[in-house]
Image: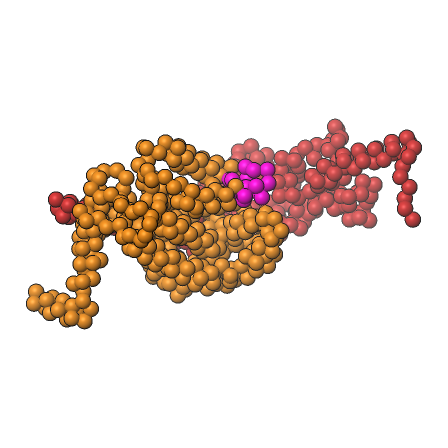
Amino acid sequence: MRTPLPTSISQLFVLCFALLALSLAIPCAARGETVCLQCHGAQTGRGGIPVKQWRNSIHDENGISCNDCHGGDPTDAVNAMSPARGFLGAPKETAIPAFCGRCHIGIMKDYLQSAHGKALGKGGPTCVTCHHAHDIHKVTLDLINQTNCSRCHTYERAAIIKNAMQQTEANISAIGSTIQNLKEQGVDTDRYEKGLFALRNSYHALFHEVNTAKVQGESGRINQELAKISGQLTQIDNEHRQRRIIGGLVAGLFLIGALFVHLLKKTYDQ
Amino acid sequence: MAIFKKIHTWLEVRLGIDDIVDKRLTGYLLPRNINAWYSLGSVLLVIFILQMVTGVLLLVYYVPDADKAFKSVSIIMNEVPFGWLIRMCHAVGSNMMVAVLLLHMLSTLFMGSYKSPRELNWLTGFILFNLVLATSLTGYLLPWSQLSFWATTVASNSAGAIPVIGPYLVEFLRGGKLVGPPTLGRFFAVHVTLLPLIIASFVGLHLFLLERIGVSSPPFGQQETKSTWTGDRFRYDRHSNGIPFFPNYLLQDGTSILIYLAIFSAIVFIDPYLFFPTTAFIPADPYKTPAHIKPEWYFLANYQTLKVFPSEVIGLLVQGVAMTFLALLPFIDRGKERHPLKRPVFMGCFVGGILLYFAMMIWGHFS
């Protein structure tokens, strides 16, 4: 049976309203806004702060939303925070490493083995003490600083660790860009990339280590391995430099040849 | 020296080489005012031979399989002794071939050498230009990189704009709805067998026509030779007061070829990446579209033309009309005058056309 066309003014009004609502809903859906963000984002008090902080975070940058950590149903405003829908809420202090460690498994392990992790529940720092709960940024060595570390202990040991790691980070970064440059020239960098990846992981594992001797020793080992990769890359770079020199010579020889042939032609023309 | 004399006598008795030398080399006279631009044909012949040789050498290691193509090119570049040199010569050579071909055609246009009775020389040359472009396009896909995959996707998509047959043509070119392993197989076969054979045939035909009708005189310089062809019957355009092909003009050819080789080797050894964007060294990924897909420099003007018109059909039509006009130019432009300064309308179109081509190319690059 065919649906009759809306003829009365009220039916037309309902239709227009429905179309308007639909047109407003489409951009929202296109942005992928969850009900968590819609509701908390609109709040001006305490409830809205996490959304504002999250919007500047690396989690937002990588598409990790509220429900990815806190659970719940991001599509149903009524039952979004229902435990039946998997809502976890905010973790207790001692549960924070396990809460973050669901994704950052290796980092959790490193943390728990460190002096920081062993002091969990006894006044020691948790993940959010240094990294914050929602305003989370890509970790750099700048996180180790006088202000952060002095909240709990003196900065001296932290400074030693930071110094040891700064050199490693600079080496990793320099080798990474050399590999990228060579890759853009058609060099098969697979082996070097894998080596660097493994060393970068070892370096990252030191991020939660507070034993200065261990950090210094491990940094030394990593730097030695990095030096080997760097040496191999330098060799490739030297080969490329040699090619350029040979190319210049070959081009020069061709030009001399051209000049000679040109002069020979002149003699015949005369 | 006695040994050379003996070899000469032996060959003379069996082949009559003195006659060949007299007719084809020392006795083959060219216009006295012939200039260096005429040697671009010889340069192109050298490039074609180099492309054939390097192409055959690449075939030894290249695997035309979508799963192995990129890896095989990487092996050529990194493991095969001098593989990088062979590959770079082939890739840079293809770009240089298009550039030199464009110069050759522009000089022919400028000097009016396409005019009667050399319509067929122009037409075969024009067809050769299009065949070289087709070879470049088919060769572009073979490394199976992100660049080659997506550039081929965009290029083959353009054919879809042709009314009625467009979608069928795209499917025929690709061997499926999308660019994939069958496309690689098709492009490989066409690139290494069909197109080189056709190109070699047309080069032969082009040279035959050149030899048969004779070299045209430049419209400027010393007017020592003048064409007396009236169009009533075939006549070889001889230049009785001209210079011999050997040694005079062969030395000019040699000079031009050596200058070309100097530029070519400088690019190959010093900066071969001039023609390679970053995406050329990333394996093809059909699920990851690069941010800016641009065709090779010689297709940029065509690419931009498709974009400036409201529909691709109009863009294709405009290009089709322009190409047909160029192909048939000797049949349209029937005037006898060949000096560019005495042909203001032609000069306006010539300079305007070049400026428009470069403007579209630059616009296409930055759009």
Q: Quadrant of the N terminus of chain B?
A: bottom left
Q: Nearer the viewer, residue B146 or B32?
A: B32
Residue A154 is at least partly visible in this image: no
Residue A11 in the image: x percent, y percent?
Answer: 90, 34
Q: Note whether B193 is above or below B290 in the view shown.
A: below
Magenta-drawn stretch contains B359: no
Q: Nearer the viewer, residue B257 or A158?
A: B257
Residue range highlighted in magenta: B303-317
Q: Colour of chain A?
A: red
**Identity of the residue drawn at 60% across and 56% down:** B168
- Kindly give the residue lying farthest to the front in the view shown: B232
Q: Nearer the viewer, residue A111 or B209?
A: B209
- Give the total number of marks visible in the rendering: 0
Q: Note whether B129 is above or below B23 in the view shown.
A: above
Q: Main secondary structure of the magenta part?
A: helix
- Kindly give the residue lying farthest to the top in the view shown: A44
Q: Judge from the rendering whether residue A241 lies leftward or rightward of residue A135; answer left or right.
A: left
In terms of image quadrants, where is residue B348?
Answer: top left
Residue B105 is at least partly visible in this image: yes
**Identity of the residue drawn at 26% across and 50% down:** B237
Q: Judge from the rendering whether residue A56 lies leftward or rightward of residue B91; answer left or right.
A: right
Q: Colour of chain B?
A: orange
Residue B187 in the image: x percent, y percent?
Answer: 49, 59
